Amino acid sequence: MSEQDPVIVGPRELVLASTSPYRRALLERLGVPFRCRAPVCDEDAIKADVSDPIGLAQTLAREKAESVALIEPGAVVIGGDQVVWHEKRVLGKPKSVEGAIEQLTQLAGRGHRLITAVAVWSGAEIHAHLDVTTLVMRPLSRAAIERYVERDLPLDCAGSYKLESHGIALFETIETEDHTAVTGLPLLALGSILIRLGFELP
């Protein structure tokens, strides 16, 4: 190789700023090697400062990515977050069976929005994408809600449902550009971002 020939540098290490098994499983579908690292940011403080649901999801995704990028400046870091927005309030993770039953009782027979944000930190650049999904849940009896919660135990899911599992049976309609965004990461947009950054997808 002569001195004039360009030096091709391979893509940097890819890190997912999350310990979520759902996001890990989604990112694995792109076929790009990566590892996970827990983000270091005060989510409760951010939620207290940002009331707009879209701004909240975007801020949380960006802060998660940045917190890991500061520790690993040579890596490309992916941060993501989801916000369930229903009747002018954010629904978080229920954390208990009763909390899940309460959330599903609020959502049953009504529509809500699931806002999914992703931020990819690459050096001095941030590549961001936002997906907004509209979901309408069918009317549900208390008994049906209790049966579902016992079956799926969606205690670590905002909105108290797992669409990738039995939760799909709870809904009448789902309007989205990317169904993977509903379960945690918008892979269509994320794949395009990673390709632009030099990663090879299958």
Image (cartoon, rainbow, N blue to C red):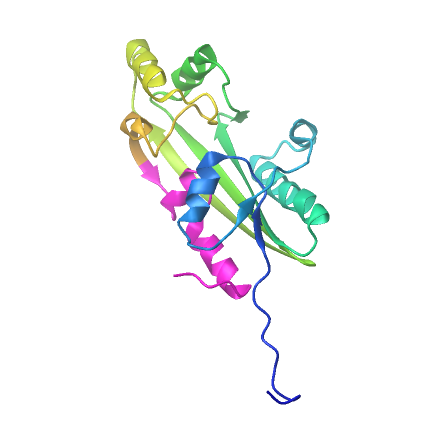
Percent x, y of residue 79: 58, 44
Above or below 195: residue 139: above
- Could you say which quadrant of the image residue 47 lies in? top right
Above or below 199: residue 9: below
**Residue drawn at point x = 34 percent, y = 34 percent:** 164
Quadrant (top left, top right, bottom left, bottom right) of the C terminus: bottom left
Instruction: Name the one closer to the observer, 163 or 177.
Output: 163
Percent x, y of residue 78: 57, 48
Instruction: Name the one closer to the observer, 58 or 42.
Output: 42
Quadrant (top left, top right, bottom left, bottom right) of the N terminus: bottom right
Examine the rendering and report whether any part of residue 184 can be seen. Answer: no
Classify residue 193 as left or right of residue 112. Answer: right
Instruction: Name the one closer to the observer, 30 or 185.
Output: 30
Examine the rendering and report whether any part of residue 160 can be seen. Answer: yes
**Residue drawn at point x = 47 percent, y = 45 percent:** 131
Q: In the rendered structure, which segment of residues is drawn in magenta?
A: 174-202
Q: Which residue is the extreme one toward the right? A: 70
Q: Specify whether residue 189 is painted magenta.
A: yes
Q: Specify whether residue 82 is painted magenta.
A: no
